[in-house]
Image: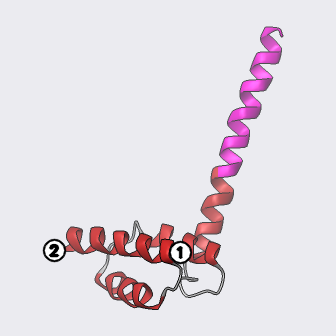
Amino acid sequence: MGRDGAMYLAGGFVGGLAVGLIVWSQQTRRYRRDLFSRRKLRRLAALGYLRGQHTPDNVRLLRDYVNWETHEKLRRRGQRILRRMEASLA
């Protein structure tokens, strides 16, 4: 593989990474309001969004979510995010 081939390969990798990040960001924004959705992936995306949004309203929302969630892994993730959020607001 020549120098041009390596450049195309590196450019393709960086481009693919950028597209992947953009798509994930859009999905996270789209699903951030789906904390109580029937779909686990949407709830996971909503948790990911809320993880960075430390507000008293989100603490109350996460408390409701943790009490509502039936899937054990998602409930534990919600509890971890809630504890971190409470500690940062204390």
> Is residue 28 at least partly visible in the picture?
yes
Give residue 62's quadrant in the image: bottom left
- Report the residue at 36% width, 70% height from top: 81
Return the residue at label 1.
46
- Report the residue at 55% width, 88% height from top: 36
Please state which amino acid type lies under the numbered disc 1.
Answer: Ala
Disc on res. 32: none
Main SS of residues in magenta: helix
Position of 61 with respect to 22 (left or right) is left
Viewer-side residue, 37 vs 50: 37
Give residue 90's quadrant in the image: bottom left
Q: Which residues are magenta?
A: 1-20
The residue carrying pointer 1 sits among few (fewer than 14), some (14 to 19) or many (20 or more) residues within 10 Å by Cα, namely: many
- Element type at marker 2? loop
Return the residue at label 2.
90
Please state which amino acid type lies under the numbered disc 2.
Answer: Ala
Q: Position of residue 14 (x, y in %)?
A: 68, 35
Q: Position of residue 75 (x, y in %)?
A: 45, 78
* Marked residue nearer the N-terminal end (2 or 1): 1
Q: Which colouring convention does the figure follow?
A: secondary structure
Viewer-side residue, 53 vs 46: 46
Quarter of the N terminus within the rendering: top right
Q: Position of residue 49 (x, y in %)?
A: 49, 69
Position of 22 with respect to 11 (left or right) is left
Q: Position of residue 31 (x, y in %)?
A: 61, 76
